[in-house]
Image: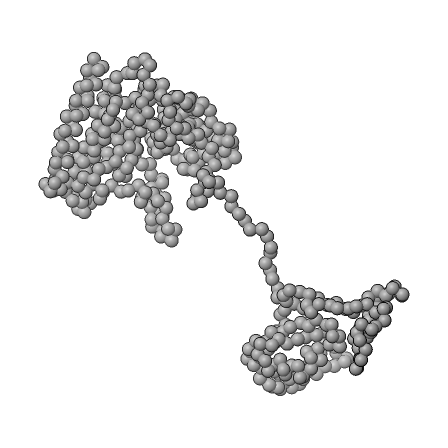
Amino acid sequence: MIETLGGIREISNTFGQEKRRLELRFRPECIYSKPAFGDGRPATGLLLKVVVQRRKSQPDYRAVSSVQIAGCVRRIFNFDSLCDFQQLPAFRMPTSGKVECVYSDIVPKGVNTKSPLEKPTTIPFFLPPVCFSRTDSINSFVLREPKTQKISPIESTYRRRRQKYGIYHPFTLTEPVPETANAQAQHMLTSKIISPDDVEKVRAAFKARPIWTKNALVNINRLVINSQTLGLILPSVAFYYVNGPWRGTWVRYGYDPRKHFEARVYQLLDFRVRSIGSLHECIKIKRLSLTKINYRTAEPTAAAKEDEQNFINCTFDEDTIPPYRVIFYQYCDIHLKKIQEMLKKVPSPKSGTVCDERNGWLPYRFDDQCRNIMMEIVLNNIRRLREENPDACSAMESVEEDDDEGDEGEVSGFEEDDEVETEGLLDSLDDVTD
């Protein structure tokens, strides 16, 4: 063992140098032997001399006769590295045809005054490298090509690409509406294993009413369908208008609202609660109520899940307070007698009249009049709610008190002037229809 480590002198020199590695040669008599290296580490231990008795007649017999402490160990060498490749000075000789070791012929013994080039031609040259392996440590790294994600210029880098294959149709006066769905949209219904009952419910809703918003479709029909599932069903039943009077709505394939005057009731009205008094204190913002919150906070996440289970009222009537500050209604979902009468009194277009790109089949500023009527009802409902539940609305400031400070002109002008303008619009509609 001492000879394989280079002798006592080599071991002492290695211990005297802290960063030197201890060399272990399995063939110490060969100068071409590649050593295995041991790394020194500090340790605390005892070197014991144990004498064990054995018996030839009983090979399994062991008995410890004495134990003696030989010394204190403060440094150990562990041979954890790999041993390098070995190349022996052996060649197949051309004369005999056998593999022979020529170590004694290559390595001189004693003092040699001859030139190394002056040697018999039968002895081959033997010049092995200093080391064969680049490292002597185990490396578990697997070489592979880096993964590159292909991102198209249109695709966003913050979300996965939506593969719903829907038809998002721009509103124009000349381009025809889509008649059928894409083949990929129909294939998605079978590849995603969607229930046929859910598809039939959506198709039945579009047969009864050709134009829907997604929220109205779910809430009015009380569809218990996952949002992702509904996003796969809709492209197979209807196309989506991205702009125009029916923007943000899903229209049944083959139905052209530009050719049907009764489609005016399906136009979209964006209603925004105005900043009058302290209305924003009791009506929340949609993006704050539906946005996904950090998963570490459990309470907001649970509240967001509860909101998904409840059907949000997407219709407007005399007792409505909008759930959000900005909400979209279709005119057929606004159950107000005054607005429905205004819709009925809209004169039928003459032959050759085309649909307006902005107002559709409705007169100019028809949507502004509807917003004024709806805003007045919202104000009255909030006042009544505050009177009935003063404790729940104690944080809200009084609308009447704000009116005294300067909002009186805005509210009163809204209540009187807009009402006169609305009555004038109704009278004009009566004259046209008469």
The answer to whether 104 is drawn above or below residue 197 in the figure is below
Horizontally, residue 253 falls left or right of residue 413, namely right
Instruction: Report the residue at 33% width, 25% height from top.
Output: 357
Quarter of the image where the C terminus is located = top left
Image quadrant assignment for residue 248: top left
Question: x%, y% of residue 306?
Answer: 34, 43
Say which of 18 and 337 sits in front.
18
Question: x%, y% of residue 360?
Answer: 31, 23
Is residue 280 visible from the viewing direction of this image? Answer: yes
Is residue 1 visible from the viewing direction of this image? Answer: no
Instruction: Report the residue at 44% width, 24% height from top.
Output: 178
Horizontally, residue 34 falls left or right of residue 296, namely right
| Colouring scheme applied when the structure was drawn | one colour
Instruction: Report the residue at 50% width, 31% height from top.
Output: 184
Count numbered badges in the picture.
Answer: 0
Image quadrant assignment for residue 263: top left
Question: x%, y% of residue 59?
Answer: 74, 77
Instruction: Report the residue at 85% width, 68% height from top.
Output: 121
Question: x%, y% of residue 282?
Answer: 22, 42
Say which of 36 and 278 sits in front.
36
Image quadrant assignment for residue 13: bottom right
Horizontally, residue 342 falls left or right of residue 251, namely left
In this view, which residue lies farthest toward the right? 95
The answer to whether 176 is drawn above or below residue 305 in the figure is above
Say which of 21 and 214 sits in front.
21
